[in-house]
Amino acid sequence: MGVETRRYMRLLVFFDLPMVTKAEKRAYVQFRKFLLNDGYDMIQWSVYGRILNGIDAEKKHLARLAEHLPPEGSVRSMTVTEKQYAGMRLLVGMPLFQEKKVSVSQMLLF
């Protein structure tokens, strides 16, 4: 499949997890570690995203996400195209280092 025919997308994960008891804090830490180890970048607190290469990758990562959900709280996901993601505006604050603009031809997926 050529670079021109690939459909890059972003999988965004939003979560709000309770952190009152020791078990809840542990579930939060485990879920966050899973996201980081699975290639997600923190966009802001409780919002993580990763790049995908097509619908098959989306299905695979949604299944992996479902396997690692914490027992309590609220976790949501949304998939957007790379063009939609690039149209996101930063209204207050500075862009993170991970948000440096990279063209599609410079991306390297593993």
Image (spheres, rainbow, N blue to C red):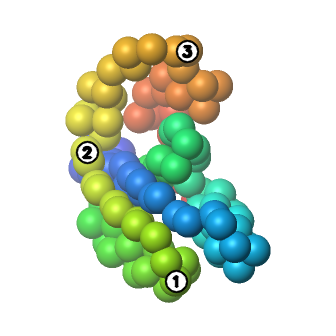
Q: Is residue 51 left or right of residue 87?
A: right
| Distance of label 1 from label 2 (alpha carbons) | 30 Å
Percent coordinates x, y for residue 72 in the rendering:
49, 78
Q: Residue 54, relative to residue 21: is it above or below?
A: above
First of labels 2, 3 by sequence position: 2
Percent coordinates x, y for residue 87 in the rendering:
27, 25
Q: Residue 21, relative to residue 71: is it above or below?
A: above
Res. 96 image quadrant: top right
Residue appearing at x 38%, y 73% in the figure: 62
Residue tagged by mark 1?
A: 71
Q: Are marks 2 and 3 in contact (CB under 8 Å)?
A: no
> Which amino acid type is shown beneath numbered disc 3?
Met
First of labels 1, 2 by sequence position: 1
Foreground mark, 2 or 3, reads 3
Which label belongs to residue 62?
none
Q: Secondary structure at mark 2?
A: strand
**Is residue 9 something one can see in this rendering?**
yes
> Which amino acid type is shown beneath numbered disc 2?
Thr
Q: Quadrant of the N terminus?
A: bottom left
Q: Residue 53, relative to residue 85: is it above or below?
A: below
Res. 55 image quadrant: bottom left
First of labels 1, 3 by sequence position: 1
Residue tagged by mark 3?
A: 94
Q: Quadrant of the C terminus?
A: bottom right
